[in-house]
């Protein structure tokens, strides 16, 4: 902890704002300026007197905080581990399952990076598991087994006070740790961005609680240079019609649950649904035309999403969490048209499975919600079976979500207005265009013809 005796305290600076007057104490420690606003002149005078009294007694000031060594803030009195647990409990019921999991992962990496010593009685993996799965899980912590409790007690004894965040070099150390995988390589850009976003919210909470005086994390360009991300879809991930048809056909002939899974993947491909939206659909959400009708397009009503987050992160104890549609207001719905090919597939699927209106449209083997592990395993097996090795190793259709990317891109390339595609997809137009702009092609010849037909200035004399 670096200290100095180079201290200067200035007069209180009053500021009359539109709503209230604030009184700011100003002082300089080792050339660095500090400011602390107060609502009343009495509070400001009291704090200023403390600074003058400490400087007059020849007391050293901490360079990192600008305060006298004797000034014990809340950050010095509370351990980081205790504060992190308090934060998780305060936010638990405000967060969804995936957000809870993200907070636990970030706080685990942060807490391990701040430990005063390395564990000797426990393995590093045991420490991380105890923190992620128990300490930073409000629901499970009271039921932690004895071996986990022993690990957490060791963590609490070896956790520094929150004031450690007032040391810039330790802040840099933590940020390097959360930006790095366990194997020492740099984490993905989206992961680094998520970790820093979580830490920023944690630090703002610390400031509101009066545990820290200011957010110690870097701001502006310094905080974003290493964490730039893009939501633009990689064009290489899109499937052509032949590849999609081959994958869907292989899934249909899969010995175990092939026909049920074929209907599920066909719905993703033809309607561009998110997987968590498709698994939540009921039979009554599908409007099928009469068999003899001329227009054989069906219509899907999308109103619920059930993402798979893990039963330890949900309030219900279920693996899936029931939620409203992503990016939509509570209770909002949308409709998506289904190609006549999908109409035939869904009509046959409902008939073969003997489904009733209130049943889940796509079920697991035991009649419950279709598991994400089954979906991913079937998709990977189909890709490996039908794609050449070099294509299988490429991003083409690597994720189940690429069915959605492929369909939305096709709609745009087929000339469907972006506003209509955004409505079907459940996105805003701005997000849609920012995500798929690089994937839209094949329209240049038509655009050139339109520009030529619109006319332009006459060629200057002598041109050509």
Image: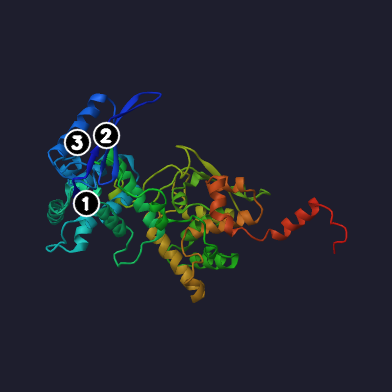
Q: Could you give the CA–CA distance between mark 3 and mark 2, rounded to whole angstroms? A: 10 Å
Q: Is residue 144 above or below residue 48?
A: below
Label 2 and label 1: CA atoms lie apart by 49 Å
The local secondary structure at tag 1 comes to: helix
What is the crowding at mark 3: few (fewer than 14 residues within 10 Å), some, or many (at least 20)? many
Q: Mark 3 points at which residue?
A: 51
Does residue 409 appear to the left or right of 126 in the view shown? Answer: right
Q: Is mark 3 on a helix, strand or loop?
A: helix
Instruction: Please give the residue where the numbered disc 2 appears in the rendered image.
Output: 10
> Which image quadrant for residue 238?
bottom right
Could you classify mark 2 by the number of other residues whose Cα lies within 10 Å: few (under 14), some (14-19), or many (20 or more)? few
Q: Distance between the residues labelled 1 and 3?
A: 43 Å
Is residue 20 found left or right of 48 in the rendered image?
right
Q: Nearer the viewer, residue 289 or 28?
A: 28
Going from N to C along the chain, the mark reached first, 1 or 3, is: 3
Nearer-the-camera pick, 245 or 87: 87
Q: From where the camera sits, is residue 364 visible?
A: no
**Counting residues from the N terminus, which is met first, the one under dot 2 or under dot 1?**
2
- Contact (Cβ within 8 Å) of mark 1 with mark 3: no
Give how far across and how far down residue 133 sits, in percent: 24, 53
**Residue 17, percent from left and from top:** 39, 25
Q: Report the mark closest to the observer, 2 or 1.
A: 2
Coordinates of residue 60 in the picture (x, y in percent):
16, 45
Residue at figure coordinates x 59%, y 67% from the top left: 242
Point out the frontmost of discs 1 and 3: 3
Horizontal and vertical percent for residue 190?
Answer: 41, 56
Q: Pick whichever of labels 3 and 2 is earlier in the sequence.
A: 2
Using the image, tell me which numbered label, if any, was put on residue 134: 1
Q: In front: 227, or 217?
A: 217
- Count the marks: how many? 3
Q: What element carries label 2?
A: loop
- 107 on left or right of 366: left
């Amino acid at each position: 902890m670096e200290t100095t005796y180079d201290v200067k305290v200035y007069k209180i600076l009053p500021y009359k704002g539109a709503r209230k007057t604030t009184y700011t104490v100003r002082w300089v420690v080792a050339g660095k300026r500090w400011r602390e606003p107060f609502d009343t002149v009495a509070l400001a005078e009291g704090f200023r007197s403390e600074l003058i009294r400490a400087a007059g007694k020849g007391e050293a000031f901490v360079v990192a905080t600008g305060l006298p060594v004797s000034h014990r803030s809340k950050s010095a009195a509370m351990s980081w581990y205790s504060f992190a647990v308090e934060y998780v409990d305060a936010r638990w019921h405000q967060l969804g399952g995936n957000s809870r999991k993200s907070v636990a992962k970030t706080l685990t990496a942060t807490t391990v990076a701040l430990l005063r010593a390395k564990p000797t009685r426990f393995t590093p993996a045991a420490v991380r598991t105890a923190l992620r799965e128990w300490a930073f899980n409000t629901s499970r912590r009271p039921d932690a087994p004895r071996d986990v409790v022993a690990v957490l007690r060791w963590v609490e004894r070896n956790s520094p006070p929150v004031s450690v965040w007032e040391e810039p070099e330790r802040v840099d150390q933590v940020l390097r740790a959360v930006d790095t995988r366990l194997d020492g390589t740099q984490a993905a850009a989206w992961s680094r961005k998520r970790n820093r976003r979580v830490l920023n919210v944690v630090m703002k909470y610390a400031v509101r609680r009066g545990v820290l005086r200011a957010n110690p994390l870097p701001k502006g360009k310094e905080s974003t240079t290493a964490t730039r991300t893009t939501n633009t879809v990689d064009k290489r991930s899109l499937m052509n019609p032949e590849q999609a048809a081959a994958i869907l056909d292989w899934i249909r002939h899969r010995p175990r649950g092939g026909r049920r899974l074929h209907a599920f993947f066909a719905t993703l491909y033809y309607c561009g649904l998110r997987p968590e939206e498709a698994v939540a659909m009921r039979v009554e959400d599908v409007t099928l035309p009469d068999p003899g009708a001329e227009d054989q397009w069906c219509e899907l009503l999308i109103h619920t999403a059930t993402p798979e987050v893990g039963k330890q992160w949900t309030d219900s104890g279920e693996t899936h969490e029931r939620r409203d549609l992503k990016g939509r207001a509570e209770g909002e719905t949308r409709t998506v048209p289904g190609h006549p090919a999908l109409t035939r597939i869904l009509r046959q699927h409902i008939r073969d499975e003997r489904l009733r209106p209130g049943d889940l449209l796509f079920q697991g083997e035991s009649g419950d919600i279709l598991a994400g592990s089954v979906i991913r395993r079937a998709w990977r097996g189909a890709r490996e079976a039908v794609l050449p090795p070099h294509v299988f190793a490429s991003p083409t259709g690597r994720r189940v979500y690429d069915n959605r990317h492929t369909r939305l891109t096709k709609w745009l390339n087929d000339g469907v207005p972006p506003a209509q595609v955004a409505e079907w997809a459940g996105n805003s137009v701005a997000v849609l265009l920012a995500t798929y702009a690089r994937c839209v092609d094949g329209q240049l010849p038509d655009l050139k013809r339109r520009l030529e037909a619109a006319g332009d200035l006459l060629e200057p004399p002598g041109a050509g």
